[in-house]
Amino acid sequence: MKKYAHFLVSCLTVVLISNALCAQTSPAPRSRVIGAVSAVDATANLLSIKTDAGDIYAVSASPETKLLRLAPGERDLSKAQPIQFTDIAVGDRVLAQGPVKDAEKTLAALRIIDMSVADIAKKNQQEQADWRKRGTAGVVTVKDEAANQVTLRLPSMAGDGEVVKVALTPKTVLKRYAPDSVKYADAKNSTLAEIEKGDQIRVLGNKDEATGAIQAEQVISGSFVNVAATVTSVDPAAGVIVAKNIETGKPVTIKLTAETNLRRMPQMGGMAGGMPGGGMPGGAVGGQRPAGAPVAAQGGAPKTGAEPGAAGGGWAGGQGGAAGVGGARRGGDFSRFIEMMPKIGVDTLKTGDTIVVASSKSANPGEMTAITVLAGAEGLVAMAQMRASQSGRSAASNGPSMGMNLDVMSMVPMQ
C-alpha cells in the first residue's frame, strides 16, 4: 500500500512539474494589433485593421474602451488626448489593445491609440522638407571605425563629385536595406561595421563648420547597382522584363514591384539645356521643369513615426533627391531630373528599348528587383560611353552603367 501511495505521489509530482513547464514555455496570448484602419462602422463601434503583414482584424470597442490620439512619433502616453470613436478615420494608424483571437481575427479593445492620417501626412511632409534641407547622399570611399566616421563621394553626372566626411555619434540612428529588397520597411537596425566601401548611404545632419564633417543624426545604407540594358522581352502580367546587359552582354531578369518607379526619358532633341551637374543632354537647368513634363505626385502609404522622407512621398517611387548640407544641392541631382519624367506602364516597353535599371544588389547577378527603370535611355548610355572613352576607360572595362554614377540612394523607396 505504501509503495502504491508513493507511486501516486510520484505521478502527481510529474504531472505538476509538466504543467508548470508547459505554463512557462507556452507563449502568452497576443494582446494587441497594430495597423492601418481600412474600414469604420460607427454604428457598431467596429474597426477593420489591416496589419503591415496584410492580415485584417475586426476590432470592437465598448463604452469602457479608452480611446486616445497620439501625435506621430510621440511615445509618451501622458501627451495623448482623449477622442471619440467617430474621430477615427480610414487611413489612421492604430494600436488596439485587448484579448486577441487570431483564429477569428478579432480583438475586443480595452484601449485604442490612434494616429490620424492627416497628422501622419503632415509629419511626413515636415520630415521630407528636413531631408531636402539637411540630407546628403553619396558613395562610401573610406570607413574609419576607430574615428566613428565615413567619407562620402557625392554623386555627379560630370564625373567624380565632392568629398565629405560624416561623423557618427552614439545617438546616430543607423539602418540598412535588406538584400533583394527595395522597401524601407524591410530595413534593419544596423551598425557602422556593416557599412562597406562602395556602399551608398544617405545621412541627415548638419555640417560642423569647425571640422567640416556632417554630424549624422540618421543614416540609411545599402548596396546598390545600376545597369544599362536592351529589352529582349516583356511580361506585363508577371511584371518581368528580360534584357541584355550592355556592359556584360549577359541576360538579366528584371522584376518589377508595386514600388518600382518606371519612367521614360524625353527625346533628347525636345529638351532645352543640359542635365544638372554635367551638361548631359536631356536635363533640366537650375531645377526648372521641362515643358510638358508633369510634376511627380506624392506616393507611399503613411507610416507611423520616424521614417526618413524626401521630396514626393518619402523617396517612394524614387521621387525626391539628395540635398546638400544647408539646403544647397551637391553634385548632379539626377533624381530631381527623374521625377520630371513622365511615368509609364510596363506594357509600353518594347523589344529593343534601351533601359537603365537601379536596383539593390542581388545574390544572383542575373536577377534584379528594380527600384527605378528609365526607358528611352539611348542618349544617356551613349553619353556615358563617350565620357568613359574620353577619360581613357573602355566601356568594356568600366561599363557604361557604372560610368553614369547614378544616385541610386535617392531613388530608394522609404515607405
Image (cartoon, helix red, strand yellow):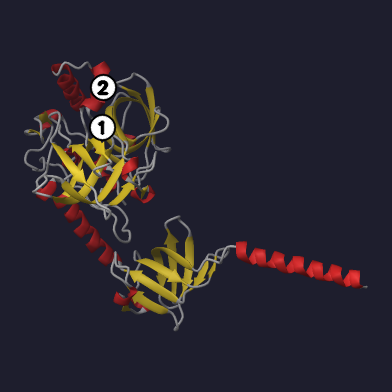
- Could you tell me residue 190's position as x and y percent? 35, 47
Badge 2 vs badge 1, beta-carbon distance below 8 Å: no
Relative to 205, does residue 69 appear above or below in the rendering? below
Residue drawn at x 42%, y 56% as measured from the top left? 52
Residue drawn at x 17%, y 41% as measured from the top left? 165
Circle nearer the N terminus (2, 1):
1
User: Callout 1, which amino acid?
Assistant: Ala
Q: Is residue 228 left or right of residue 44?
A: left
On the question of residue 76 being in view, the answer is yes
Alpha carbon distance from label 2 to label 1: 18 Å
Query: How busy is the neighbourhood of tag 2: few (under 14 within 10 Å), some, or many (20 plus)?
Result: many
Relative to 112, does residue 136 appear above or below in the rendering? above
- Could you tell me residue 194's position as x and y percent? 34, 41
Q: Is residue 307 left or right of residue 368?
A: left
Dividing the picture into quarters, in which one does residue 124 lie? Answer: bottom left
Disc 2 target residue? 399
- Could you tell me residue 409's position as x and y percent? 25, 41
Disc 1 target residue? 375
Between 198 and 380, the residue placed more toward the observer is 198
User: Mark 2: which secondary structure?
Assistant: loop
On the question of residue 319 being in view, the answer is no
User: Callout 2, which amino acid?
Assistant: Gly
Dividing the picture into quarters, in which one does residue 111 lie? Answer: bottom left
**Closer mark to the observer between disc 2 and disc 1:** 2
